[in-house]
Image (cartoon, rainbow, N blue to C red):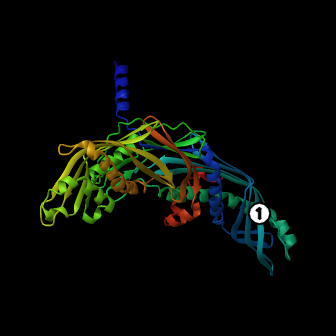
Amino acid sequence: MALFGALFLALLAGAHAEFPGCKIRVTSKALELVKQEGLRFLEQELETITIPDLRGKEGHFYYNISEVKVTELQLTSSELDFQPQQELMLQITNASLGLRFRRQLLYWFFYDGGYINASAEGVSIRTGLELSRDPAGRMKVSNVSCQASVSRMHAAFGGTFKKVYDFLSTFITSGMRFLLNQQICPVLYHAGTVLLNSLLDTVPVRSSVDELVGIDYSLMKDPVASTSNLDMDFRGAFFPLTERNWSLPNQAVEPQLQEEERMVYVAFSEFFFDSAMESYFRAGGLQLSLVGDKVPHDLDMLLRATYFGSIVLLSPEVIDSPLKLELRVLAPPRCTIKPSGTTISVTASVTIALVPPDQPEVQLSSMTMDARLSAKMALRGKALRTQLDLRRFRIYSNHSALESLAAPLKTMLQIGVMPMLNERTWRGVQIPLPEGINFVREVVTNHAGFLTIGADLHFAKGLREVIEKNRPADVRASTAPPPSTAAV
């Protein structure tokens, strides 16, 4: 009995599980591009390493090594991979660091000083980024693991006490190597948990699309990594700005991502588009009223010609009155995605009237229209754009001959309504990507109940540029890594 009860609860939980409206998959094809940009950022971060002064005494010799600066990073081998438990793992082997420091030596009353170049060779770094969902639904770097080691140091001492330095070099370089080992991981920990998180903060979670609606891109669970990709499930739901807690139930199929040929794939279910159209409907955005000069001239002429028989029967002071065209959607439109294409079904009322000054308007026609629009999706930069085209429609009216209205009405919609509608939909809505990263060379594929867009990535801005723009106040001291992640 207990088994049946547990099975029932599991089925009940599955029945109420909410599917994501938007999914994003980053494949291993993107890792080389990400690695190149990441290594540039890593090199700049390692140049910020601050090494404490190294002081010591051997017999009557007193030495002081100070102002140690990392000048360059040379990489001979590096790999960036997805790992199921760690998400992202970067391994650098046999690298070298160029350094410059100030030397000071005192022997009895003799003093020697100056600057010298050195190198740290056989540098190995293994660091992993663990990604998770924070309470607000934002992706974060929740932990950074790190192991770093320097095999050997070399410094070309010269000057008056060259032989003395050669004698002391073992002590000095060993001390510097130890200090350098201790500084690499704290820098990487800060770069991951603070600086990279400031980059992830530029990904929209709940933001306004325009003055009427917003969109919720909160993560529904932690990102999931395999050996070949990283998958993220986003809620992908629109909402009216006046009803921020309103939510459309998601009854669409769950979008699926199977491909791995491109750098990134984005999937959108019918729910994504249905929630957008219902949000605009609830916000009063799916209605159009044009009066007088707002009616395009060609459309004004068309409507007056169409209703000429009705207009000439009116009184002279009404005949030349401004025209009014009102289009009002009667129910939230619905999106249907099939392998053959994407369509939008909409039912609307169309009212055409004359509006004489200081008099009641004179209605020329009122009808109901069922229309079907084809929708073509495109990804430009990081915006999902839509191009709509009127395919089919039917009209119902108790006051006019439908056959005579069909052609003028279609022309009216195509020249007067569709351009305004497309002007709005082509602005697009932002996809949840960090600032400075765009999609290029996209390919749209329709499936049953969802569509996918495969694309490559392009860094329009460098990581350093974006991070510097969004850099938080320096909290390096408060984000030191725990001992378990420090360098060995």
Where is 437 relative to 4, above or below?
Answer: below
Q: What residue is rendered at 32% in x and 62% in y?
A: 297
Where is 352 relative to 322, above or below?
Answer: above
Q: Please provide percent x and percent y for residue 314.
A: 14, 58
What is the total number of numbered labels drawn onto the structure image?
A: 1
Q: Please provide percent x and percent y for residue 343.
A: 39, 41
- Residue 419 found in image quarter: bottom left
Q: What residue is rendered at 60% in x and 39% in y?
A: 227
Q: Look at the numbered disc 1 and give the secondary structure of its residue.
A: strand
The outermost residue toward the right is: 163
Q: Residues within 10 Å of mark 1 (few under 14, many from 20)?
A: many
Q: Please provide percent x and percent y for residue 101.
A: 73, 71
Q: What residue is rendered at 42% in x and 45% in y?
A: 375
Instruction: Name the quarter where the N terminus is drawn.
Output: top left
Q: Please provide percent x and percent y for residue 275.
A: 34, 45
The outermost residue toward the top is: 1
- Say left or right for 380 vs 6: right
The front one of 471 and 118 is 471
The front one of 105 and 408 is 408
- Residue 352 found in image quarter: bottom left
Residue that label 1 marks: 119
Q: What residue is rendered at 25% in x and 64% in y?
A: 292
